[in-house]
Amino acid sequence: MAELQAILTQAIHLFFELIQWLILIRIFLSWIPIPLGGISQFIYQTTEPILGPARELLRKSPLGGGMMLDFSPVIALFFMQPIEYLLLGLVNLL
């Protein structure tokens, strides 16, 4: 059972670290005017399920959606940490 916990812990940590890196890469890609294709399209498709809800949350907030900068990556990264800790805590209960 301890071996399963170790594998799940590593998998969860790796998943969240990968998503965080993809979000950071997407931020840098947004500064470069290149057409979406190949790897950049994969990054956008992978991170949009996380950034889309964060963008919607910002749009509904008192700040509104009229900001010039997209702060959804900041919101997503902020919420990802507690979610990762919650999942790791659940794995440790096994």
Image (cartoon, rainbow, N blue to C red):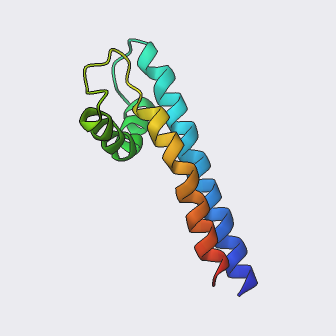
60 and 36: which one is in front? 60
* Residue 75, quarter of picture: top left
Residue at horizontal 40 percent and vertical 44 percent from the top:
46
41 and 82: which one is in front? 82
Q: Is residue 3 above or below residue 40?
A: below
Apparent side of residue 33 relative to residue 77 in the rendered image (left or right)? left
The picture places residue 30, in percent across and down from the top left corner, at: 42, 20
81 and 22: which one is in front? 81
Q: Quadrant of the N terminus?
A: bottom right
Apparent side of residue 31 relative to residue 65 in the rendered image (left or right)? right
Q: How many numbered marks, from 0 up?
A: 0
* Residue 20, quarter of picture: top right
* Residue 47, quarter of picture: top left
Residue at horizontal 44 percent and vertical 13 percent from the top:
32
Apparent side of residue 14 relative to residue 78 in the rendered image (left or right)? right
Q: Is residue 69 above or below residue 48?
A: above
Apparent side of residue 74 relative to residue 18 in the rendered image (left or right)? left
Q: Is residue 83 above or below residue 68?
A: below
The picture places residue 70, in percent across and down from the top left corner, at: 37, 24
The picture places residue 85, in percent across and down from the top left corner, at: 61, 60
Q: Quadrant of the C terminus?
A: bottom right
Residue at horizontal 40 percent and vertical 39 percent from the top:
42
Residue at horizontal 51 percent and vertical 21 percent from the top:
28
Q: Residue furthest front?
A: 62
Q: Residue furthest bottom?
A: 1
